Image (cartoon, rainbow, N blue to C red):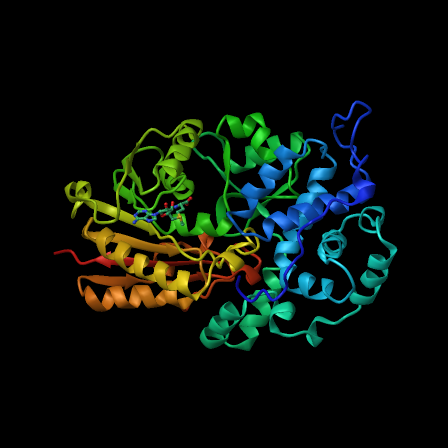
Amino acid sequence: MVGSNQKNTPFRKPQSNKAGGRGRAGEPRQGAVSRFGLVSQVAQLIDLLNQFEGPADATISRFFKDHPELGGRDRPLVAEAVYCWLRYRFRINHLAQAAEGPPLMRQAKLALLWSGAPEPVWSAGRQSDNEWLSRVINISADDLASEPRTCLPDWLTAKLLDQFGPDRVESFSQAVLKAAPLDVRVNTLKITAGDLQQALAGMGVKSEPIEGLPDALRVEGKPALGKTDLFQDGAFEVQDAGSQWVSRLVAPRRSDLVVDFCAGAGGKTLAIAALMKNTGRVVALDTSERRLQKFRPRAARAGMSNFYTLVINDEADPRLNKYYGKADRVLVDVPCTGMGTLRRNPDLKFRQDLQSLAELNEKQMSIIEQASKLVKPDGRLIYVTCSVLQDENERVVEAFLAAHPEFRLRRWTEVLNPNERPQKADTAADMLRLWPEDGESDGFFAAVLQRSKA
Ligand SMILES: C[S@@+](CC[C@H](N)C(=O)[O-])C[C@H]1O[C@@H](n2cnc3c(N)ncnc32)[C@H](O)[C@@H]1O
């Protein structure tokens, strides 16, 4: 485990939890977990998450399924606490060692406290742990070593320091300790942004337009939008503003053939199709059948019919030959470390390291090379990552351009009009970089490469 010098002892269920959340017949009661039980539930989930055996959101969903005694009021508290623990893991685990006995319950208490749970929740349980809590919350982060201070693994700090300098390490590390806002992309095939805002307000959900992003709303809080009729009817998709901006950089025209080379579950494919007003043709490719399968119901909800999906074996799959030199736009949203999305996926900083970065880098080079063959003369290749690291961004684009004189870089500001631009992005730069600390979106990178006419 990257930088983890803290070994947790396995979780043991405390005696006092025996009756917590149980009905008379021993059946779980919805929302009836005792306060001490809640600290213990968070500790159990932290213990599971500490194994980093898969994405944190899947582990959390499974845990909730396995623990029906956690009701509707408890789940958000537990989820907020474990996300807080993931963000602050280096600091929380470091501080939790500064006392006698197994550290798990202390980790859970501090995570509950820092995530804003009410005092009766985090103060339940051992008095000695509360004494520890009152000691450590006064410790200044400046007095801690690098990992507990920045809450970033040392390999990432070293990269950021080398590529951008100490101010960026500071601003980035602070920014990714916060939760990301909830952004939606209005499906303009079905509704306008103004009408959606009103309809959400009618359900008690407040939202605001996002400056420089005409078809987007930023929603207040974390309402369960997926259960609403509006969502089921395809009026909107949940999509980070940055993901929406890089989709707009594809700038498709209505009759274009657009290939989304790494379409996944189709977040950007859907945004592109909406820009095309359901005309032209979009080919959604991916090596993962499971991900592409998730795209189809989303497309149906959105009322999108101008697409075709194809599961490929790899980027050099011979079934791609028929598209060589045919596509007006090819979007390559390559697999990357995801270091721009740490506000949303804080566990990624523990699941990536220098070795996975090197492996991804090799894949990115190979994908951009193969995908470029599909671009027709005068067409465009749009290279995108949700990483902030130069290795996966500028370095890949520069290496590609050096080997391909038939492609040239188009400045991102030539493609996005002033009224559809992120306000804080550097307009003097050729390639688009979005930083989480700017408060507009997650971290994204995009470069537009135009193929020569002949
Ligand atoms: C960053 S994700 C794409 C996210 C998606 N574009 C969206 O907006 O939701 C990268 C995707 O690349 C896919 N992938 C990995 N290797 C690939 C390859 N060799 N060719 C095409 N896609 C690949 C992964 O399965 C994954 O879905």
**Horizontal and vertical percent for residue 256?**
25, 41
- Residue drawn at 35 percent across, 43 percent down: 263
- Residue drawn at 31 percent across, 43 percent down: 287
User: 327 or 418, which is in the foreground?
Assistant: 327
Asked whether residue 200 is in view, the answer is yes
Using the rendered view, name the quadrant where residue 427 is placed: bottom left
**Horizontal and vertical percent for residue 284?**
31, 39
User: 26 or 134, which is in the foreground?
Assistant: 26
Tell me: 115 left or right of 437.
right
- Residue drawn at 67 percent across, 34 percent down: 67
Please tell me whether residue 157 is drawn above or below residue 103 in the rendered image: below
Tell me: 234 left or right of 284.
right
Quadrant containing the C terminus is bottom left
Outermost residue, top direction? Answer: 25
User: 247 or 260, which is in the foreground?
Assistant: 260
Asked whether residue 180 is in view, the answer is no
**Horizontal and vertical percent for residue 453?**
15, 56
**Horizontal and vertical percent for residue 321?**
15, 44
Count the numbered circles shown: 0
Outermost residue, left direction? Answer: 454
Please tell me whether residue 213 is drawn above or below residue 103 in the rendered image: above
Tell me: 83 left or right of 211.
right
